[in-house]
């Protein structure tokens, strides 16, 4: 099963029903619900989502949305080690692509 990291904006497109990418974001979540992909979201994204949804809608809707969100997605913590590992992985991929 493919693993994906959800960008905050994909989640906000759904929470706020933003027209531009709403359909594409719904499609991603349908793949999650059908268990075709396993989705992760960072804990820092959760706090951003709460703040933005609360400001645009209200506290209760924000909390309910987040509860629903974390019921179908896995939370991950981003640490210094995570960031350094991602940088190293990207550097290794670039080296392979360009034979460096």
Image (cartoon, rainbow, N blue to C red):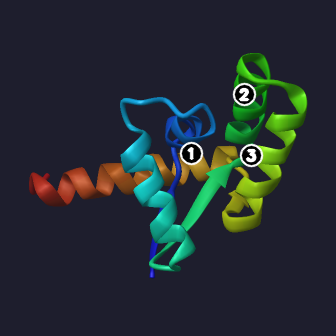
Label 3: few (<14), some or many (≥20) within 10 Å? some
As drawn, the label of residue 43 is 3
The residue at the point 36 percent across, 30 percent down is: 20
Residue 25, percent from left and from top: 44, 48
Label 1: few (<14), some or many (≥20) within 10 Å? few
Foreground tag (2 vs 1): 2
Residue 46, percent from left and from top: 74, 41
- The residue at which mark 1 appears reads as 83
- The residue at which mark 2 appears reads as 53
Closer to the chain start, of discs 3 and 1, is 3
- Against 8, residue 54 (above or below) is above
The residue at the point 70 percent across, 33 percent down is: 49
Residue 69, percent from left and from top: 71, 54
Quadrant in which residue 38 is drawn: bottom right
Which residue is outermost to the top? 55
The residue at the point 47 percent across, 51 percent down is: 86
Label 2: few (<14), some or many (≥20) within 10 Å? many
Indicate the quadrant containing the N terminus: top left, top right, bottom left or bottom right.
bottom left
Disc 3 secondary structure class: helix
The residue at the point 56 percent across, 45 percent down is: 83
Disc 2 secondary structure class: helix
């Amino acid at each position: 099963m493919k693993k994906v990291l959800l960008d905050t904006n994909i989640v906000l497109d759904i929470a706020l029903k933003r027209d531009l990418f709403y359909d594409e974001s719904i499609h991603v979540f349908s793949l999650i619900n059908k268990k075709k992909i396993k989705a992760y979201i960072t804990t820092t994204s959760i706090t951003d989502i709460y703040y933005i949804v609360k400001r645009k809608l209200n506290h209760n809707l924000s909390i309910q949305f987040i509860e629903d969100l974390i019921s179908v997605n896995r939370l991950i913590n981003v640490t210094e080690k995570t960031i350094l590992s991602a940088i190293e992985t990207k550097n290794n991929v670039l080296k392979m692509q360009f034979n460096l």
